Amino acid sequence: MKKYLVTGCAGFIGTNFVYYMLKKHRDILLVNLDKLTYAGNPANLEGIGNDARHIFVKGDICDPELVSSLFGKYDFDYVINFAAESHVDRSISDPGVFVRTNVNGTFNLLSKAKDAWCDAEKNVWREGKKFLQVSTDEVYGALGKDGFFTETTPLDPHSPYSSSKASADLFVKAFHDTYGMPVNVTRCSNNYGPYQFPEKLIPLMINNARLHRPLPVYGDGMQVRDWLYVDDHCRAIDTVCSQGKPGEVYNVGGHNERTNLFIVKTVIDVMREKLGDGGISENLITHVADRPGHDRRYGIDPTKIGRELGWYPETSFEDGIVRTVDWYLDNTGWMESVTSGAYLRYYEENYGSRRKLTADKGFSE
Ligand SMILES: NC(=O)c1ccc[n+]([C@@H]2O[C@H](COP(=O)([O-])OP(=O)(O)OC[C@H]3O[C@@H](n4cnc5c(N)ncnc54)[C@H](O)[C@@H]3O)[C@@H](O)[C@H]2O)c1
């Protein structure tokens, strides 16, 4: 039986990963270490019920004693590190916590994995172990109109979030290059799907549209992102974990570049069609002041993971967005529980203070 330490799996991608793995593999143990920040929601995991293959541990990836004791207790084969502070806007207002979790936390996991997996005197690594760091295309910086990020594109992060993720990636590389630790890094484009916290574009738009609230779009809305359905990302991580060549980085993308404005208009169309609700219209779109240092375009080239490991995205954007809207409309209770309390304060701070932009002024402030 393979034993995994999976971190941050009460968050968006991690939750989907746990469900994906329990469905796909019979003989498996997933120990899910999550601090339950605002982004972690234990209710996400209720569908697992009493399945003994999943053990939830509330705790911090930065805690050396806790992580050591988990290695001692479970003797993991794999560590898959999803845990992170993940929202760019929050990294602009409070960067320190991004350094703590994303850099120091990753370093702590690497150190404890090395203690458990490497005979320090002989510098011999135990067979069948791997550390997989879940990273992001944002570490590459921004692109112009043309070109794509490949795995050899130099790191050029701009936000405190992407800088902290790039730093973590470099520590993972250092543990491989210096000590020979078997590692992989995956760098993925924007994910969408169930269980995503509604500070991110797609669930935010779905939630606001259903409540007939303004749909805040940063600047002109022409920022381009590549969008990947979360199940495809989970399958990529599983594939890299079992088959990726140690020391390698794999880009994961959906071949699906869209502007933010296109995404918002698509959400409106899908919701109108589902609900027949005339109150949901493009009139709700409100352009607001852009995020400082907002990268204009990300575009990922996932050729390597296809060529070497046979992974390709399977869900088209047209199908994925319908499935996503369906999930949020079927789970309005989930949405309401995560958008109460602290979220409301955050929302007011982030969007309430942004000046509204008007089309007749060419979207300038
Ligand atoms: N969402 C995307 O589109 C996307 C794209 C590319 C890469 N990624 C990366 O994938 C990973 C998961 O992203 P997500 O969108 O699911 O994030 P998320 O914010 O939804 O979830 C993060 C989880 O980590 C937990 N966490 C935070 N700090 C912790 C700590 N110190 N110790 C233990 N747990 C902690 C939170 O409680 C939460 O459950 C992140 O590393 C992110 O950088 C995300």
Image (spheres, rainbow, N blue to C red):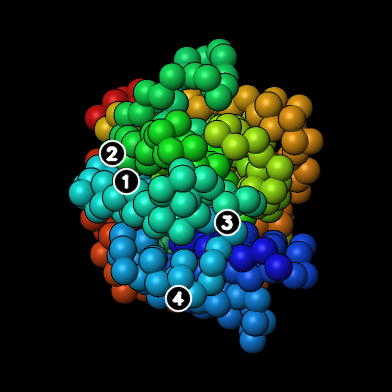
Q: Residues within 10 Å of mark 3 (few under 14, many from 20)?
A: many
Which dot marks residue 57? 4
Q: Is residue 289 visible?
A: no
Label 4 vs 1, first from the N-terminus? 4
Looking at the image, do the residues carrying marks 4 and 1 touch, with CB atoms under 8 Å apart? no
Question: Quadrant where the C terminus lies?
Answer: top left
Question: Which quadrant holds residue 276?
Answer: bottom right
Label 4 amino acid? Val
Which residue position is annotated with label 2? 160
Residue 301, relative to residue 61: is it above or below?
A: above
Looking at the image, do the residues carrying marks 3 and 1 touch, with CB atoms under 8 Å apart? no
Label 3 amino acid? Tyr
Residue 101 x/y as whole percent: 31, 54
Ligand 1 lies in which image quarter? bottom left
**Residue 349 in the figure: left or right of residue 259:** left
Look at the numbered disc 4 and give the secondary structure of its residue: strand
Which residue position is annotated with label 3? 78
Looking at the image, do the residues carrying marks 3 and 4 touch, with CB atoms under 8 Å apart? no
Which residue position is annotated with label 1? 103
Instruction: Identify which residue, 286 or 138, lies in the foreground.
Output: 138
Question: Quadrant where the N terminus lies?
Answer: bottom right
